[in-house]
Image (cartoon, rainbow, N blue to C red):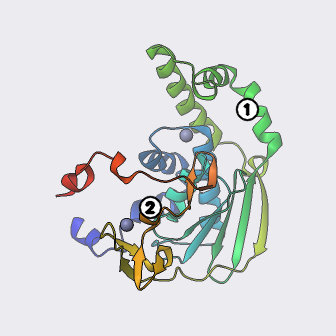
């Protein structure tokens, strides 16, 4: 089995199998390996990814044959990533900073399906799971320190909720549209250049060229884009590169 997997194209076999047999719960647990916990929005991402893979008859090897355009960086996106195989690292995940729980999954010929979490469905959740929402509000939204019991209870409620929600009908869960889109080009390959100050390699498209030398953004004190919990923002402040614990990351790698 390991030898077969080493061929490379079978590493997603288990996920493809779960999609083929319609095992949503199995897919949910797979996604939780990436996400770290079970929760409702991840379940919706799993379901959206599953529907797209089935409807478009897709298989993914993470080579941009399937593209997912995701409009949020909440828990939903991890469900989508695991099931579609479209990730940040393989360039098949395109992030649009719209703040919507929605995804468009496309084939390279542009045949696509967009699924957005139905607001009516989403609004119903608070009445459906009052205890989970009360704890969520306290622990996650207001960042109030929970007791260990409260934390455990929230995780348990989230897990139960995520499994229950998977069974909800897709036509109530999502507003779904079939569409034809212009699929972005395959990710370009960029040469690396060496930063004249820190001596690290940097993608040429991200280096500042000056007087025949190249500089990375931090060394040049150039602003940069950052994606975090608030979405994408432009950061202008200087990064103090010496702030990090020196030698930490590199030492670990060896
Ligand atoms: Zn989550
Ligand atoms: Zn540098």
Relative depth, front residue between 254 and 102: 254
Q: Position of residue 29 (x, y in %)?
A: 46, 45
Helix, strand or loop under label 1: helix
Q: Position of residue 87 (x, y in %)?
A: 50, 63
Near mark 2 (Cα within 10 A), the count class, few <14, some 14-19 or many ≥20, is some
Relative depth, front residue between 236 and 171: 236
Q: Assess mark 2: CB under 8 A from ligand 2?
A: yes
Q: Position of residue 94 (x, y in %)?
A: 60, 66
Helix, strand or loop under label 2: helix
Position of the C terminus, as image quadrant, is: bottom left
Residue 116 falls left or right of residue 218: right
Count of residue discs: 2
Relative depth, front residue between 211 and 115: 211
Task: Say the numbered circle drawn on residue 226.
Answer: none
User: First in sequence: mark 2 or mark 1?
Assistant: 1
Task: Say the numbered circle drawn on residue 125.
Answer: 1
Image-quarter location of ligand 2: bottom left
- Against 144, residue 123 (above or below) is below
Near mark 1 (Cα within 10 A), the count class, few <14, some 14-19 or many ≥20, is some
Q: Residue furthest left?
A: 254
Q: Residue at x 46, y 83 (%)?
A: 189
Residue 239 falls left or right of residue 39: left
Q: Residue furthest right?
A: 120
Task: Say the numbered circle drawn on residue 218.
Answer: 2
Q: Measure the alpha-carbon separation of dots 2 and 1.
A: 44 Å
């Amino acid at each position: 089995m390991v030898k077969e997997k080493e061929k490379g194209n079978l590493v997603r076999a288990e996920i493809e199998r779960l999609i083929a047999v319609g095992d949503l719960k199995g897919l949910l647990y797979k996604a939780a390996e990436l996400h770290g916990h079970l929760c409702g929005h991840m379940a919706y991402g799993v379901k959206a990814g599953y529907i797209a893979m089935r409807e478009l008859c897709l298989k993914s090897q993470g080579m941009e044959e399937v593209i997912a355009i995701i409009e949020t960086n909440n828990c939903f996106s991890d469900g989508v990533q695991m099931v579609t195989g479209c990730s940040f690292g393989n360039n098949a995940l395109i992030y649009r900073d719209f703040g919507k729980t929605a995804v468009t999954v496309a084939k390279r010929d542009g045949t696509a399906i967009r699924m957005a979490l139905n607001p009516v469905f989403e609004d119903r959740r608070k009445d459906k799971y009052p205890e989970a929402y009360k704890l969520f509000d306290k622990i996650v939204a207001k960042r109030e320190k929970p007791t260990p019991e409260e934390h455990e209870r929230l995780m348990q409620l989230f897990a139960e909720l995520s499994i229950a929600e998977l069974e909800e009908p897709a036509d109530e869960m999502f507003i779904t549209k079939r569409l034809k889109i212009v699929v972005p080009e395959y990710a370009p390959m960029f040469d690396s250049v060496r930063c004249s100050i820190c001596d690290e390699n940097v993608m040429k498209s991200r280096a500042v060229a000056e007087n025949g030398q190249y500089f990375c953004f931090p060394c040049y004190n150039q602003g940069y884009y950052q994606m975090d919990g608030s979405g994408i923002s432009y950061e202008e402040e200087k990064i103090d590169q010496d702030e990090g614990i020196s030698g930490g990351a590199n030492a670990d790698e060896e």
